[in-house]
Amino acid sequence: MHPAHIDALARDLATASLTGEGIRALVGVDAEAALARAVAAPARRAALRSPGTRSTLLRALVLGDPVPTDELADALPALGVDGAVALGLVELDGDSARPRFAIRPHAYRDALGEGEWWIASDLDELAGVAPLRPDHVLGIGGAARTLASLLPPADAPVDAALDLGTGCGVIALHLRRFARRVVATDVSERALRFAALNARLNGVDGIETRLGSLFEPVAGERFDLIASNPPFVITPREPDVPAFEYRDGGRTGDALMGEVVAGLAQHLTPSGEARLLGNWESVVGADGIYRADGLERAGAWASDDLDLWAIERESLDPVRYAELWLRDGGTLPRDADFPRLADAWLDDFDARGVSAIGMGWIAARASGGRPPLRRLERVGQPVALEHVGAHLRAALDDAAWLAGVDDDGLRETVLVASPDVTEARHQLPGAAGPNVIELRQGGGLGRSLSVDTALAALVGASDGELPVGTLLTAIAGLLEVDEAVLAADVLPRVRELVLTGFLRRLED
């Protein structure tokens, strides 16, 4: 791909306003929403009713439709049809130009703010392509958006970041906003070509692409930030079961996730952090006895010099998991191959005693020689993703602080209730007091906690004025209980509230 061709294409896309706002103005809000659901017909209908350069590029690059060559020439005055062919963007078929890949605007949000990029990727279900080719390069999906939201904010750019399994390169683009240089790796040469194209198309430098599996291309190197949506999908290792480079890592079960987590510590700087998406299996023995919880397995993958926080967002039984990924690859229950492929997946799970597959997030950090954090939790409630990156960073900071503070030190600490925390009290008619007191978190992970009167009183009085110990003394007097007994009960729960973001240290 010649850089001049990519630069010319970027100028043409900008001139035609092939942006989210431009597409919305062309096709309308409802048709734009349908595009997000991979339904092309309403946008195609609107575009054909409003001919012009933006309409032509929408049909060709967003929907994947062939367009007349003369219309494409008008829509790409800087690149030209010959340049589009040389770039591999289209192939000519008589008087028609047939797109070979898609370019779509992607509005993003991460810890540093909002923006929009053009992202090139293979034609997909929106363009009527099914089943997908084995080396398909995926565009923007929910997983990429989620991983971007997990990235930690930074007061200043870090030196180096790693995008492990970059795919189309969108996470590498996000990482470049946080780091002075980025290494993007993948086992797919096609993926790396797309990643390089997308960086140039959006005028982003400082991203180096390297071919290879997992950490092999960066052996001996360390990074301040590692992000990965690795090919973690658990696929039967059978020759007649389709495998896709973007999702299948060629390992049995969840072994690939174990390799990624195990390799983090030796590739992080002393203060480095990592954010991952992944799967983990829960296993039941042949005798029906529960053998291994998936979250516990995820925690065991980490080395002793790594803090690890695994958050399971969803758990699927083997049947639903198999159906999810068969559909993802373009095989539907009505298709002739579906029963055979579903059997292969279920046979694989049965052979290994897999009872459930957890899906979620991992936040990790080099522990710096202190006892490592191991936090494993299931968070099923809705979460506002825009808050998660900052929350996980703060939680890891707080975990490190709490590890070095005894109860006497905690009593001397001044805390303040986070501004997103509210309190709800539920009381039966005629009752003398509340039956249930709840603390609710608007940000963070959107938690709701039932608390007793003492803890509710401490949170309510944590306004940044008095230390925890003074508040405990006052609360013990009001409740007429022994202060030492109250402290033994409340202080561990105060630690949890600090870690989960309900309470903050004043210096924060």
Image (cartoon, helix red, strand yellow):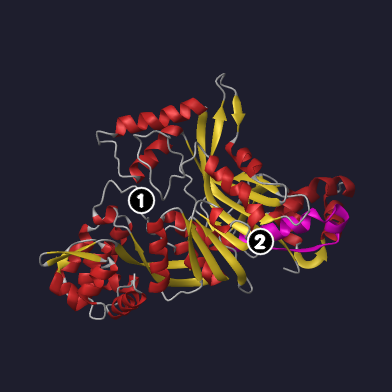
x and y percent of residue 186 in the render? Answer: 46, 56
Q: Which sits in the foreground, 159 or 16?
A: 159
Q: Is residue 414 above or below residue 37?
A: below
x and y percent of residue 366 in the render? Answer: 69, 56
x and y percent of residue 180 in the render? Answer: 57, 73
For badge 1, the amino acid type reads Asp
Location of the N terminus by quadrant is bottom left
Residue at position x 30%, y 44% in the image: 330
Q: Tag on residue 452? A: none
Residue to which mark 1 is pinned: 135
For badge 2, the amino acid type reads Gly
Alpha carbons under labels 1 and 2: distance apart: 32 Å
* Magenta span: 390-417
> In which quadrant of the rendered view does residue 235 lie?
top left
Q: Is residue 284 above or below residue 306?
A: above
Q: Tag on residue 272? A: 2
